[in-house]
Image (cartoon, rainbow, N blue to C red):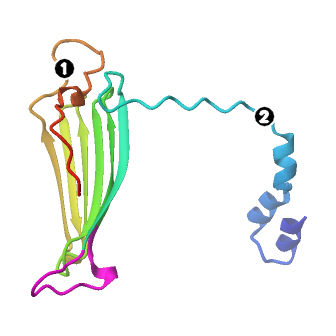
Amino acid sequence: KLGEAFGRVGLLPPAAAQTLSHLVVASPSVVLANMPHSTPAPTPAPVSIFSPGLKAFSFSFASSQKHKGRGARTMPQQESESGRGELRVDLSSQRLYLRSEGRFSRGLPQVESRVILRGDRGRLYARTKIESQDYEQCWSVRTTEGPPQDGLTSVRPNPFLRAKFLGSMIM
């Protein structure tokens, strides 16, 4: 009724008032009580990065650097060099997405890069943007290894399976 009243006194255009007149508002607790209960999907078991069963993985990252030492001046916290981003890899679809952004110096206050690998198409796409310099560059590059030529549509093996443990580094 509120939409209808707003329309009659001219606070809303007639079309908006007509749409709102059909709106039904209900308490969230009433709506939730009347919804059918579904069983949540089971959480899949974690897969080791070295497992042949690894099909996809992703993570976010962040970094920062503080200037210290002789002759170096510590930049204020909001101006410190830092970066962040995300990586998503789908081994079964042969795809990779990387987004990273960061502040590297006063001259480069904000740099953003995006990289997309479409292994199924044999293409690599890259975009770099530096707004303060009014700079933007995009690339589309054919990768040396295009789509599989063996005619197989099966999933390629986990590339981490070739890794060799060389020890650990304590920081």
**Is label 1 or label 2 in front?**
2
Indicate yes or no whether the magenta region holds residue 81. Answer: yes
Instruction: Locate residue 43 relative to residue 97 in the image: left or right.
Output: right
Which of the two residues, 69 or 159, is positioned nearer the viewer here? 69
Residue at (81, 54) in percent of width and height = 28
Residue 147 found in image quarter: top left
Of the image marks 1 and 2, the number of the one nearer the N terminus: 2
Image position of 42 with respect to 78: above or below: above
Q: Amino acid at mark 1?
A: Pro
Taking the spot 17% from the left edge, 80% from the top edge, the residue there is 107
Secondary structure category for the residue under label 1: loop
Q: Is residue 73 magenta?
A: yes
Report the quarter where the N terminus lies.
bottom right
Give coordinates of residue 19: x percent, y percent: 78, 58
Q: In front: 6, or 34?
A: 34
Tell me the crowding category of disc 1: few under 14, some 14 to 19, or many 20 or more residues within 10 angstroms, Cα based.
Answer: some
Report which residue position mark 2 lands on. 37
Q: Amino acid at mark 2?
A: His
Give the side of residue 62 with respect to residue 147, left or right: right
* Residues tagged 1 and 2 counted as in contact (Cβ below 8 A): no
Q: Height in image: 28 above or below 81?
A: above
The C terminus lies in quadrant? bottom left
Q: Please tell me how crowded label 2 is: few (under 14), some (14-19), or many (20+) other residues with Cα within 10 Å.
A: few
**Residue bounds of the magenta highlight:** 66-82
Q: Quadrant of residue 5?
A: bottom right
x%, y% of residue 112? 26, 63
Say the numbered circle drawn on residue 148. 1
Instruction: Looking at the picture, tell me which residue is in the foreground, 88 or 144.
Output: 88
